[in-house]
Amino acid sequence: MKNKIKKRFAFIFLSLLIVLTLGSFKTDFFEIAKQIEIYNSLFKEINMNYVDETNPAELMETGVKKMLSELDPYTVYSSEQDVEDAKMRRSGDFVGIGANLQFINEALTVTELYKGCSADKGGIRPGDIIRKINGISVDNSSNGVDVLLGGKKNSVVDITYVRNNVSKTISLSRDGRKEKAVPLFRLLENDIGYIALTRFSRGAAREVESALKFLLIDEAKGLILDLRNNPGGLLQEAVNIVNLFVPKNQLVVSTQSNIKKYNTRFVTKQQPLSLDIPLIVLVNERSASASEIVAGALQDLDRAVVIGNQSFGKGLVQQPKPLPYGAQIKITISRYFTPSGRCIQALDYSRKTKSGAVKSVEDNADVFKTKNGRDVFGGGGIMPDINLGVSSKFDLIKILKKNNFVFNFALAYNERNPVKNLKDFSLKESVFNQFKKDCLSKGFSLETTTENLLLKAYVAAEEENLSSIIESVAVFNDALNKEKEAEFVLLKSEILTLLSEEIIKMSFYNEGVYEYALLNNKAINTAKILLGDLGRYAALLK
């Protein structure tokens, strides 16, 4: 009986999922019904007639994952338990201990602390390995770690952690503090204001507004808005931040879809705080989503000069849809477009190469016009007016972070050479060379089609004992390693910055990263020089 209920649920779920993934009302009803009938019949025949006993739930999950993988990485299915956990996390009563955790080498590792939060005050440090939460062991297969850590404000959680092979258990109060969206704002030399914005969380626009008011009271004559490494967040916060600098009823961003009801326009609704202050926005390859909306809108409206590296290019809009039995699917419904008509999305998941690689929108980059008639370019992400980036063949920075090379190296360095004073801190050439050597010796994939094909060729040649092919693949592999080394040299400055930020964060928290950047950072220095030459600034916006 239980198995029949499982099968019935699978039929219902798959039917609804097919409707959603085929586009609901935009697709011919007969075709939808036909595909549902085929899918249900196929699923039924497999479960009733396969030679071995089948698990309907597992088969369904496999089918769901494969189906969604053909769309994009942001269209995801959530089980009933996932949905309930998410609701709990969003609850105002659900707070944590002020630490970021990540599984590294199958160990739950503390990667960052929020200054003054309970984990910080309790003596937890980056690199500590969490073994138990309230007596429950956690490992790489553990689900819902954040649910175990979180709870009602001021409630107590017991943490067992390991440092230098010594285990210790402490009790921490869930304090509910959250990192500020604006960790730092300051009036720099020559009356230049600086605001760092790390996320578009609820209330972020109010924090930016408050910082801007303080700077204007201090008679700031120019402003740098730093959106580097900002992954985005709430759309309305982005619109409200743009509204601080542009008139009421100004288009900030629009969403476009094949389904008309998802075509929307977001305009400013308030009078601006400052229409005239010269403004520079800093972005890099880790500025995404809402960050790109702000940078793109201010660039298109000729309200700011954008400086830095081309942004990430995350311009897809998702909306949750309920499914039977408490499950849910978050489905991509539209794309973001800047006021000039540029699509922010960099990767076009509907276009793939023969090998299955997703094509870039850059292949079809078009020229658009700003409010003053300047040329700006589509192709995904926001291209700065002053581009400080280098042209790289591979996404090496992302790969180094993904493999935790940066964190692990920074942790080891910090243990040997803890940073005492930001003004005296700098990484020497020898540190970069050691990092490069360590990464290359450990080996890593550039995640290219070429490398994947070489690996398959090598495995096949070994299985078939084709020594000459194995030797040829080895030659190609040596050439690939030289490409990796060349990428390190090309991105030396970016890698040193990344290492410096990670090392500083371990002693001076996220605030220290921005404090250090103010001392000597290429993007900030470029912005300060430009704001000191208002004639050139104005010329860039014409």
Image (cartoon, grey):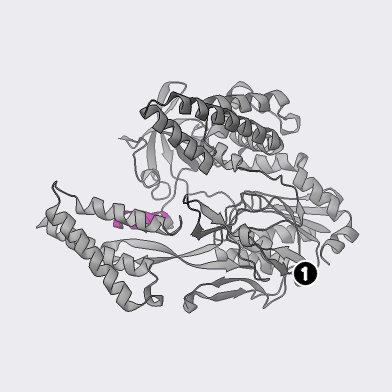
Residue 245 visible in this rendered orientation of the protein: no
Vertical placement of residue 78 versus 470, above or below: below
Q: Main secondary structure of the magenta part?
A: helix
Vertical placement of residue 343 versus 477, above or below: below
Density class for disc 1 (Cα within 10 Å; few <14, some 14-19, many ≥20) is some
Q: Residue at x 23, y 60 (%)?
A: 10
Residue 105: give x, y in percent of width and height.
Answer: 43, 31
- In the image, 6 versus 303, the foreground residue is 6
Residue 46: give x, y in percent of width and height.
Answer: 18, 55
- In the image, 497 versus 122, the foreground residue is 497
Q: Is residue 220 left or right of residue 140?
A: right
Mark 1, residue position: 275
Magenta span covers which residues? 80-89
- In the image, 348 versus 404, the foreground residue is 348
The amino acid at mark 1 is Leu
Residue 495 falls in which quadrant of the image? top right
Residue 359 falls in which quadrant of the image? bottom right
